[in-house]
Image (cartoon, grey):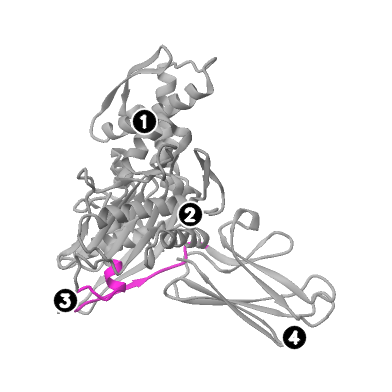
Amino acid sequence: MRFDNEKKPALGIDLGTTYSAIARWTEKGPKVYQTKGGDYTLPSVVYFDERQEKPLVGNQALKRAFIDPENAIIGVKRMMDDGAQSIRLGDKEYTPIEISSMILRDIYEYAEKTTPGFDPTGVVVTVPYYFTALQCTNTSEAASLAGLNVLGIIQEPVAAALAYGIHEEEALNDEIIMVFDLGGGTFDLTIFRLTNSKEKLTFEVLATGGDDRLGGLDFDKALAELIKEKSQLNFSGVSKEDEIKATALLMEAAKETKEILSYEDFADIIKPNILPSQHIELEIERSEFEDSIESYFAKMDMIIDSVIEKASLSKKDIDRVVKVGGSSRIPKIDELLSQKIGNAKTYGNIDPDLCVAQGASVYAAFLDERIGWSKEIEIKTATAHALGVGLSDGRFSVLIPSNRRTPCEATRVFTTNTDNCEELDIDLYQGSSKFIKNNKRIGRIHVAGLKKCPAGELDIDITFRINQQQSVSVTIVQKESNIRKVENVKLT
């Protein structure tokens, strides 16, 4: 007896900001599906064409986006912190959750077309480690809306570490690895301790950090601005329509140029009629591009230092760096990592564009109990953001700080700030700011039936518990009022 990993596979989907990929577990390891055109990734782009019944997704959508950008959406992943906001495409409005579900459905369907009788047991979808609980929940909702059976959500660096661990399992020693994940829209940096024994392969998160507004899209915008400046394009007096199209074409030129500069020292750009009777014909040197994105490298430099410090390590303790995400191919990244971590530590036997989808399929197979190993996989996680409650003066009261090993719990005692208070709302937050306005609210617990007392006389115990699966249980206790209330919040 064996599992049918072809017709009934466990799937992993890397839902990327700019590109997505889908993989399945096979007896020989993870395998990424190819599109009809032979590509392993699909642009995470949606375009509404009023001549079509439903929006276009993928390569066709990306092509149309450069011609008609007002009816396209690129980088919806950056909008997942507000799943209810409106995105207008043509004469219709969609939410980020709906747009993400279209991308997920489309990438699922191209895998489905490869195999007659395709009936997967379920999927695991990836998110950045730095995503908040709300962003993770919205991603899971998008997958469900796409009609997918969600086995679980996994953070992208954990998926990449799984792909690395599976690939190198036979030769793997106990080591400290840094996953440097620089994608189209987000930057994640996670340090793991990998322990390989006869019985178990353990991935322990030691520290994590990042920026959900730093990625290839930002590099494209900076390079587009440089191209615009060097070509001396004159936007004065042009129509709004021409300005929008020119901006989209500049972004296309920037994307193409960035890719060339990943392996060449200079790139020629020739683009006729960017604006009426205005053309681009110039040369961009790699050093000019690197100068235009220097501020982002300064941020990454600081994040690397911060995460290493949080892990209580020194740079020499890092044994291996695993690069993830298409933007990690930029040569200056290798310079940065060599300076920060040391030479010859970057792992090159894994595809940075595909390893997250591969790792997600490993996790899907693990959850579905179909990995044919005698060895157990154990993942030890840590909190990416501080968790706590909002106070009446707008401050954030932290119960569980960031980078705390899970499972864990903490209790703090609060009180009422008004006389004879009989009910109140306790808002739960996740974030790093001292003020709730800068953090993400992840839930609200209403408490009624409090005993009438003067302000400050009732003790209200609030306990946060986080389990290994990153679920948060919040318990509210007020003894004199005989109140005990428990609610759950899912972080991933």
In the figure, is residue 354 to the left or right of 68? left
- Residue 467 lies, in percent from the top left, at 46, 76
Determine whether the residue tagged by mark 3 lies in a helix, strand or loop. Answer: loop
- Residue 2 lies, in percent from the top left, at 16, 76
Q: Which residues lie in the magenta part?
A: 363-385
Distance Cα–Cα, label 2 vs label 1? 26 Å
Closer mark to the observer between disc 1 and disc 3: 3
- The amino acid on which the numbered mark 4 sits, given as a three-letter code, is Ser
Closer mark to the observer between disc 3 and disc 4: 3
Asked if 238 appears above or below 454 in the picture, the reply is above
Q: Which residue in the protein does label 2 denote?
A: 97
| Quarter holding residue 139 | bottom left
Closer mark to the observer between disc 2 and disc 4: 2
Residue 83 magenta-highlighted: no
Density class for disc 2 (Cα within 10 Å; few <14, some 14-19, many ≥20) is many
- The amino acid on which the numbered mark 1 sits, given as a three-letter code, is Glu
| Of pointers 1 and 3, the one earlier in the residue sequence | 3
Residue 381 magenta-highlighted: yes
What quarter of the picture does the N terminus occupy? bottom left
Q: Which residue in the protein does label 4 denote?
A: 481
| Of pointers 3 and 4, the one earlier in the residue sequence | 3
In the figure, is residue 120 to the left or right of 146? left
Q: Which residue in the protein does label 1 denote?
A: 252
| Of pointers 2 and 4, the one earlier in the residue sequence | 2
Density class for disc 4 (Cα within 10 Å; few <14, some 14-19, many ≥20) is some
- The amino acid on which the numbered mark 3 sits, given as a three-letter code, is Arg
Determine whether the residue tagged by mark 1 lies in a helix, strand or loop. Answer: helix
| Quarter holding residue 370 | bottom left
Distance Cα–Cα, label 4 vs label 1? 63 Å
| Of pointers 4 and 1, the one earlier in the residue sequence | 1
In the image shown, does 391 or 217 lie closer to the viewer? 217
